[in-house]
Amino acid sequence: MPRFSGLIAGAAAVEQLVVAPREQREQCPHHQALGCFGDALEKTCEPDGYDPGVSSKAAPESIWLCCCPTPYLPCTKAERNEICQAALERQFQDGVHYTQPHMKAAITLAWKEVWEQSAVCQEVLPNPMPESQCGSEIGEQRSIGRAELFCQTVTWQWEQLGDGNEPEFQRNGCPVPSSPRAIDGDSRKGHVLGSSGNSVVTFA
């Protein structure tokens, strides 16, 4: 993705990154899954503790929910993104405990596989390769070491989950989204595969 150096008012020089406009990013047929993969990577890099449950289909906010049309809301087998599902199946075996390094690698490989399926995605979203280190591994305060992946992730979180704040964007050289922050993001949190309200769905 394009980038340039600049200044944030009242702060030291910081590299400013460019995130494609929302309407362009949403032309990528896999933009929801790819944004959600970034969210999963951020969970893997949390400095207060890595949660291996991210890879489990039975865990709340599992990476498998990234394949649903609206990530983190359960969906039926027929509704899921088949390319996303196939990529995860190649990288994860349910019930296996993955170490943090293995989890990061698996997420990145699945992310790359889905990203490569569309020329549009490759044009408007950053290449997930090379694999990013966690920010804490390279002395950065942000969760994801690679700035372009971090900016893309926090932008998706802002638009889809209502997370984030302007100082976080500015501190890391990310443009503050022009679109309003989602106001119903909490309704997408805490779900697990196999349940959606009072109805049961299958996600084999």
Image: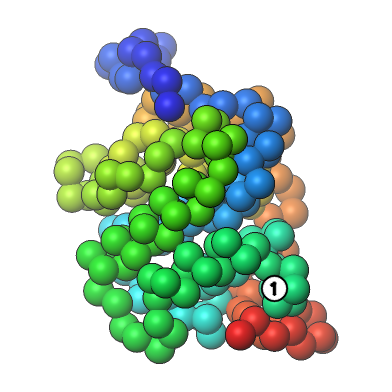
The residue nearer to you, when weighing 3 against 11, is: 3
* Above or below 64: residue 38: above
* Above or below 34: residue 54: below
Where does the N terminus fall, quadrant-wise? top left
- Residue at x 43%, y 60% (from the top left corner): 110
For badge 1, the amino acid type reads Pro
The residue nearer to you, when weighing 65 against 174, is: 65
**x, y percent for residue 76:** 74, 76
Q: How many marks?
A: 1
- Residue at x 71%, y 60% (from the top left corner): 69
**x, y percent for residue 189:** 63, 66
Asked whether the viewer can see residue 64, the reply is: yes
Q: Is residue 138 left or right of residue 22?
A: left
Q: Is residue 201 left or right of residue 42?
A: right
Asked whether the viewer can see residue 156, the reply is: no
**x, y percent for residue 30:** 61, 50
Residue assigned mark 1: 74
Where does the C terminus fall, quadrant-wise? bottom right
